Image (tube, grey):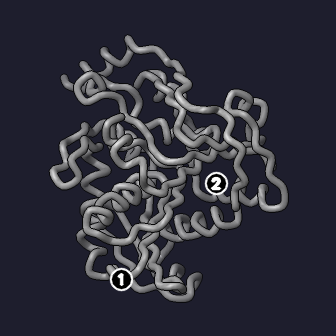
Amino acid sequence: MRIAIILLLSLSLISCERFTTNEFVKKTIDFKKVDWYAKRAQLAYSSEAEIRSKLDKVLHVESLPALDIQYFIEQLPDNRQLLSVRGTANLANVREDVEYKKSRNKNIHIYVHDGFDEDANAVFNSALPHLDKNQEILVTGHSLGAAASTLLMIYLYHEDYSVGPSINFGQPKFTNKEGAKQYDFLNLTRVVNNKDLIPLVPPVTGFSSVHGDYHHFGQEVILLSGPHFVYLDNHIVTEKSLASFWANLNDVSLKDHMIANYREDIQTKFSKQVEVPYRQRHKYHSQK
């Protein structure tokens, strides 16, 4: 009954865009650094043996089967550690994630997506004994893992860890406008494939009238074809109804969500990069 009510409310909403930020901020992106993070986000999907074979010093790898989550902690030079969280495995998980509701998190004083919050809390409690408070902590992830990793930045900040810059990939939204505003000071860059619909999750639902629409925060890099990209110092809000979202979520858009395709698009920008205005992004769709 509750889901039916949500669908009826959502069908009455229309897709629109609100331009709320400067759409062209001249920026040079270190795409090799971006790919350094993407490699680690991708490795979180691998077996423990493969993770350890690809990186020099892996301190800990753990799977949390009840939540279908895996993470690893890597020791980096210069007194730093990196925490990478594995993301959503399939469309069924994405649908389940979308249909959760927000809940008040008493530790961080914002409304958050309940499913993402559950995952982040599980990783946080498991990883904490393996993190060194005297080192800077970097986090990364893809898809659900990106949302969890950003929540982990917030949790670690409140535990007085030194939280370093984070770059993540295909992150869904997990909080509302007030929550995004409260933590916009964190050094977060979200990388988004231009045709990937998952960063629009959750779409507008009946719960939006209770807690407000879901919002992103942090810088955003939108990957386009070849050397082209868009840089935004803040997310440009795109609202889609729940019905519109699922009607457009197909095998093509899910392919564009895969971390391997993210890395391909990132690597095409190593030798040359061309920034384009947000409103012109449709001229430079990836041809894959």
The residue drawn where x is 54% and y is 47% is 219
Q: Residue beneath label 2, please?
A: 262
Against 16, is 64 above or below? Answer: below
Q: Is mark 1 on a helix, strand or loop?
A: loop
The residue drawn where x is 58% and y is 57% is 259
The residue drawn where x is 50% and y is 25% is 247
Horizontal arrangement in the rendering, residue 90 relative to residue 105 (left or right): right
In this view of the protein, which residue sits in the foreground, 23 or 12?
Answer: 23
Horizontal arrangement in the rendering, residue 119 relative to residue 45 (left or right): left
Q: How far apart are marks 2 and 1 (CA)?
A: 33 Å
In this view of the protein, which residue sits in the foreground, 180 or 117?
Answer: 180
The residue drawn where x is 72% and y is 53% is 28
Q: Quadrant of the C terminus?
A: top right
Against 62, is 242 above or below? Answer: above
Horizontal arrangement in the rendering, residue 107 relative to residue 95 (left or right): left
Give the image location of residue 146, x and y in percent.
45, 55
Q: What element carries label 2?
A: helix
Indicate the amino acid at tag 2: Tyr
Q: Residue beneath label 1, please?
A: 134
Most extreme residue toward the top, as rendered? 12
